[in-house]
Amino acid sequence: MDSEHDKPKGAAETETGFQRLRSKLRLLYHSQSPKAQRFQFSVLVVDLAIIAFFIATPLLRGNATFLWIDYSIAALLAVDLLARALASTDIVRWLKQLPVIIDIFILATLLAPTIFFNLGFLRILRLWTLTRSSTFWRPLRKRGLGGYQETVQSVINLLVFLFVVTGFVYTAFANRGDDGIAGYVDALYFTVATVTTTGFGDITLPGTGGKLASIVIMIIGISLFVRLAQSIFRPNKVQFPCPQCGLQKHDPDAVHCKACGHILNIPDHGHD
């Protein structure tokens, strides 16, 4: 009888401990307590350092310590993904989110760098997924910088596009002709010249595929520049959903929703 009662009790204790772990992670990732904010800021600093490594990867690949750094970052990302999964209230729904799917793919490229060599440039998408998380914006809003969210995201979108295209151009067109891409800097130079439609013509992509790639780069690049200009020169707005109609953006000093007239109570983070 005693042994039969001991098993359920042990299982219950294990389950309770697991629940406590999930609750603690949920507080660290999503609450606004001083301890949680310090944790979130530490995670943000580590993420930015990882992104810097991703940007420098083409230049560091031949280094003897490259694989050691690569696998160390893979371990960090794996732990972070597991912790975020446990911190979510619905793991299955969390796994279906696009930023999470991209992070899992990035982890795969880190665990098998030789297999995913040609797709390694997509790791910079980690910067895009980072700016879609509340962990990135919560400490900035606390410091009164939340009003610049749209502008920062537009800049990030442009930077991610530049480095993704640079990686693609370098992987697909490097060392293919006298006037082609000889190195990563050439690929970056070509990408910036094409996106800005400067088009110096001293570096070109060979063949029909190169011309089509250049056309796509110019069209998307112009769109991103227009989006960035709009976010900079448009009147500043704050993100605050109206309880009545759900309108997301309002003037910083708005008292009533301009869509439905409902009284707003927008927090003034600048005086926290």
Image (cartoon, rainbow, N blue to C red):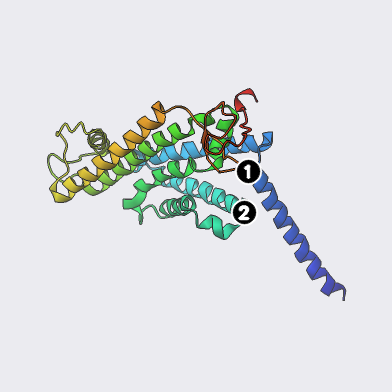
Pinpoint residue 226: horizontal percent, then vertical percent.
Answer: 32, 34
Circle number at residue 125: none
Residue at the (57%, 31%) spot, across then down: 141
Front-lying residue, 151 or 10: 151
Residue at the spot 81% in from the left edge and 66% down from the top edge: 9
- Quarter holding the C terminus is top right
Q: Are marks 2 and 1 in contact (CB under 8 Å)?
A: no
Asked if one can make out residue 84 in the rendered structure from this viewpoint, the answer is: yes
The residue at the far top in this view is 271
Query: Which SS class for mark 1?
Result: helix
* Apparent side of residue 176 relative to residue 252 in the rendered image (left or right): left
Instruction: Tell me the distance, in whole angstroms, between the alpha carbons under discs 2 and 1.
Output: 12 Å
Residue 206: x and y, percent?
A: 14, 46
Residue density around tag 1, few if under 14, some if 14–19, many if 20 or more, within 10 Å: some
Q: Where is residue 135 drawn, in percent x and y?
A: 56, 40
Q: Amino acid at mark 1?
A: His
Secondary structure state at the residue bearing disc 2: helix
What amino acid type is highlighted by mark number 2?
A: Leu
For discs 2 and 1, the disc positioned in front in the rendered view: 1
Residue 198 lies left or right of residue 63; in this view the side is: left
**Callout count:** 2
Observer-nearest of 159 and 111: 159
- Could you tell me if residue 174 is visible in this image? no
The tag on residue 86 is 2
Q: Which residue lies under the disc numbered 1?
A: 30
